[in-house]
Image: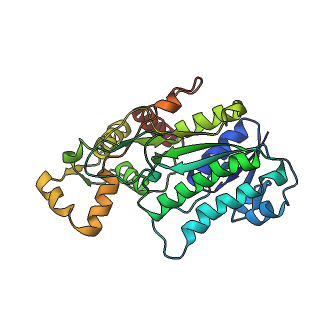
Amino acid sequence: MNIAITGSSGFIGKHLKKMITEMNLSVITISNNKNLSNFENNFSYEDFFSGSINTKIDLILHLASPNYDYSNDGSLKKGITELTQKIISKMDIYDCKKIIYFSSAKVYGEPAFHEKSFNELSNLNPMTDYGKEKANAENIMQLCSASKDISYLIYRMPMVYGPNMKSNIGNIVKIINESLPMASSAGTNNLKKSFLSIENIKTCIKYNLEHPESVNNNIYNLSDNDVYSFDEFIMHYKIISNSKSYILRIPNFAFNIISVIPYINKYLIKLYGSFIIKNDKINGVKGIKLINTIKGLTMLIKHKKTIE
C-alpha cells in the first residue's frame, strides 16, 4: 500500500510516518518543504496538485492544518478548507479512493467553566475561526464523498499529548520534567476534559491500514478512555515522572479573581475548562482497544527515559 501523509512534518505526522514505515508500507509525504529531512518520497503540494507524483496512492492521511484559533488574513480558510477541497479534487489523478481527515473537537465549541460533553450526534457550534474552518472541511469531505465516489473517515480530536509535542500542554510538561515550580488550581477539579494520547491515534490508524474497509464514511470522536481535570492531569504526570516540581496551589478566591481578567480568562478557560469528548462509538469498533490517560502518560514517561 502507498500511504500519503499531508502535514507530515508536524507532531502527529512524524509519529504516523515512523509507524507506517515500521509496518513496511510505502510512505509518501506531502509538505511545504520538498527537501524535508532529505526523505526520498517527500513532495511539495505543487507536485501533488500537478500530478507529478508518479505512483498510485491507496490512502491519504490528511493532517495538514494551521495550528491557531484566529486569522485576519484568510490563512485558516486557505490552509484548512481550501486545501482540503483541492486535495480531494486531485485524488482521482492517483486513483485514490480513501482519505482520513484529522479534524478537531473544536467543531463542537470551546471549553467552559461548567460541564460540557459531546458525542458525534451533538450539534456543531464552532466558536473560533479554526473550529469553523475545520467544520467547513468536514462538510466538504462529506459532500465530495458521493460525487467523487471516495470513502472517508473523520477523527475529531481534543488536546493531543505524546513525545516531542509542541503545545501549551507540552510547555507545562517540560516545566514538570525540569522540576521547576508551577501554579495550579485544585478548585477546578470538577471541570473534566478529554485528552488524547498519540498512542491512541496510532492504534486507530494502524487498524485502518490493516482493515481498509474500515474507511467507510464515518465520523468518530477520538479520545482517551477517561476524563480528568487539567489539575489532575498535571498531578498524575508529576507522580508518574517522579518529578520534584513544586505545585503552588492557587486559592479558589484568587483563581476566581484572575479568571475574570479578559486575556487571562481565555487562557485559563482553554486549559482548565470542561470539554468532554465521548468516545463510545470508536470503542464499539471491534479490533480497536484504546488506552486511558494514565497509561498514555506512563508510555510518555517510558519513551522519555529510553532517549535519556
* Residue 301: image location, x then y, percent: 45, 39
**Position in image of residue 280 (x %, y %):** 46, 30
Q: Answer with the quarter of the image where residue 267 lies.
A: bottom left
In the rendered image, the quadrant that contains the N terminus is top right
Vertical side of 73 occupied by 40: above or below: above
Q: Residue furthest right?
A: 54
Task: Tell whether 267 sits left or right of 213.
Answer: left
Image point (84%, 56%), residue name: 53
- Residue at image position (77%, 52%) is 91
The count of marks equals: 0
Quarter holding residue 216: top right
Could you tell me if residue 140 is visible in this image?
yes
Q: Indicate left or right for 38 with 69 as reference.
A: right
14 or 212, nearer to the observer: 212
Residue furthest out toward the left = 253
Whether residue 221 is situated above or below residue 28 in the rendered picture: above
Q: Nearer the viewer, residue 301 or 224?
A: 224
Give how far across and how far down residue 24 sits, in percent.
76, 36
Depth order, front residue of 29/101: 101
* Residue at position x 53%, y 36% in the image: 200
Q: Quadrant of residue 46?
A: bottom right
Residue 152 image position (x, y, % from top left): 66, 43
